[in-house]
Image: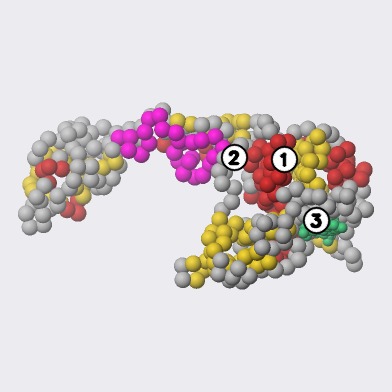
Amino acid sequence: MKLLKVDSVEETKRKIDHYFEGIYLEEEYIDIAEALDRIAAEDLYAQLEVPEFSRATVDGYAITAKDSYGASESLPTFLQIIGKVEMGETAAHKVTPGKAIYVPTGGMLPQGADAMVMIEYVESLDDETIAVYKAVAPGEGVIQKGEDIQKGEQILSKGRRLKPQDIGMLAAVGIYQIKVFRKPRVFVISTGDELVHPKEEIKPGQIRDINTYTLSAMALNGGAVLAGQVIVKDDFLRLQDIVKNAIAKSDVVVISGGSSVGAKDVTAQVIDSLGEPGVFIHGVAVKPGKPTIIGRVDRTAVFGLPGHPVSAMVIYKVFVDYILQKLQQFNEVQEIVIQGICDANIHASPGKETYQMVQLEKRDDKYIVKPIYGKSGAISLMAEAHGYIKIHGNQEGIHKGEKVEVILL
Ligand SMILES: Nc1nc2c(c(=O)[nH]1)N[C@H]1C(S)=C(S)[C@@H](COP(=O)(O)OP(=O)(O)OC[C@H]3O[C@@H](n4cnc5c(N)ncnc54)[C@H](O)[C@@H]3O)O[C@H]1N2
Ligand code: MOO
């Protein structure tokens, strides 16, 4: 009988890996100004050094460090000023022993100089002479040629989600266009005779559609574009028509509701009717979210998520995000985790991976993790939660005082 035998989370991910092997989104070139949060589709190496010349990191005088040795507040060293470096220009003169050249922060270090002494430690005696009241070591106040980025150094790896600092690295080495994976297209379908749009009046027995909004927002949050949003009644032919159209337009179709074994639960049949290989997961050993369906039609992933809003969000985070990342060869850690101390005993469901919603409280530099409870139909549970703890199927539960990892929502 269906749903009695279910796959573990690990087995489900293995099946996803198998069914989506070699299926990736196409690549495209974009300007780095548009690259935030996109996933790199190429390894990139620096073709030059950064900085390309040694630069001052302070306002002051470029000198030979040796000249300053022994200098102090009571016993300054006297040096002759022989010039000034302008920003964005080459340093014309060379520093030799006994001489100094003024350089602003970021200016080119003149030849012969190996350190900068900050103006705070210098006194101008006349137009040509300074007194230096501090000894500086070679390299002080200077960023050396190639110190930031070396020629040939890898600056980006395929599968990395581009952060502002990655974009800065690319700009630094003169790369202004980059190959990324096209944004995945996600189509969100909510099924149920009881569902109405939030702007409409509801009759007894009806409820407002929540999942369209939570799941669409999760898709956008993950860097996808929305290919469509539809509410559909529990009707095989209507749903079949809509899912068929959605598959043609998207990389991932997320259908919520209608995934369990009730008489109206037609999602699995619809997916199977639309093409090969069809449904390969029907039921996962997780709590919440057991009646999860995962299939593939041609190159499109089709999910039947449980209708309960909490379960739908949890399964989206665990499996839909997993596929979206696979399609873009994302190669980093999927979850952002915080360590904390659990402040209550938590019971687990043997044989099932349990996702326990929690709140975090900071006490004496430590995070206290408090389990919060509610039915999987209660959206307020998700709104109150800061994250969740994953309790493995072979764990009995968690004891009060135990160290736990919280996956942030
Ligand atoms: N005999 C069994 N019955 C059920 C099982 C089971 O294993 N055996 N699993 C239960 C669990 S756990 C869940 S979760 C639900 C999943 O049901 P469906 O995915 O078929 O979803 P529906 O029945 O359509 O809806 C469940 C619940 O969620 C509400 N819902 C649905 N869509 C939305 C939406 N877009 N926005 C807000 N709320 C929505 C719906 O009204 C129902 O209340 O099955 C259990 N039964
Ligand atoms: O999946 Mo049901 O989600 O346990 O409520």
Q: Going by the image, does 335 lie left or right of 85?
A: right
Vertical placement of residue 168 versus 28, above or below: below
Helix, strand or loop at label 1? It is helix
Crowding around mark 2 (Cα neighbors within 10 Å: few <14, some 14 to 19, many 20+) is many
Badge 1 residue CB within 8 Å of ligand 2? no
Look at the image and give the residue range highlighted in magenta. Answer: 145-170
Q: Residues within 10 Å of mark 1 (few under 14, many from 20)?
A: some
Snapshot quadrant of residue 64: top left
Task: Kindly identify the amino acid type of the residue bearing the numbered disc 1.
Answer: Lys
Residue carrying label 2: 330
- Badge 3: how crowded within 10 Å, few (<14), some, or many (20+)? many
Q: Nearer the viewer, mark 2 or mark 1?
A: 1
Specify which label sits upstream in the sequence, 3 or 1: 1
Residue 398 shows up from this direction = yes
> Residue at position x 91%, y 52% from top?
264
Q: What secondary structure characterizes most of the magenta part?
A: loop
x then y, percent, for residue 142: 26, 42
The residue singled out by tag 1 in the image is 15
Can you give x and y, in whole percent of width and height, for residue 400 in the image?
59, 70
Instruction: In the rendered structure, find residue 307 and report the number of the disc placed on it.
Output: 3
Give the residue type that dot 3 points to. Gly
Alpha carbon separation for disc pair 3 and 2? 28 Å
* Earlier residue among tags 2 and 1: 1
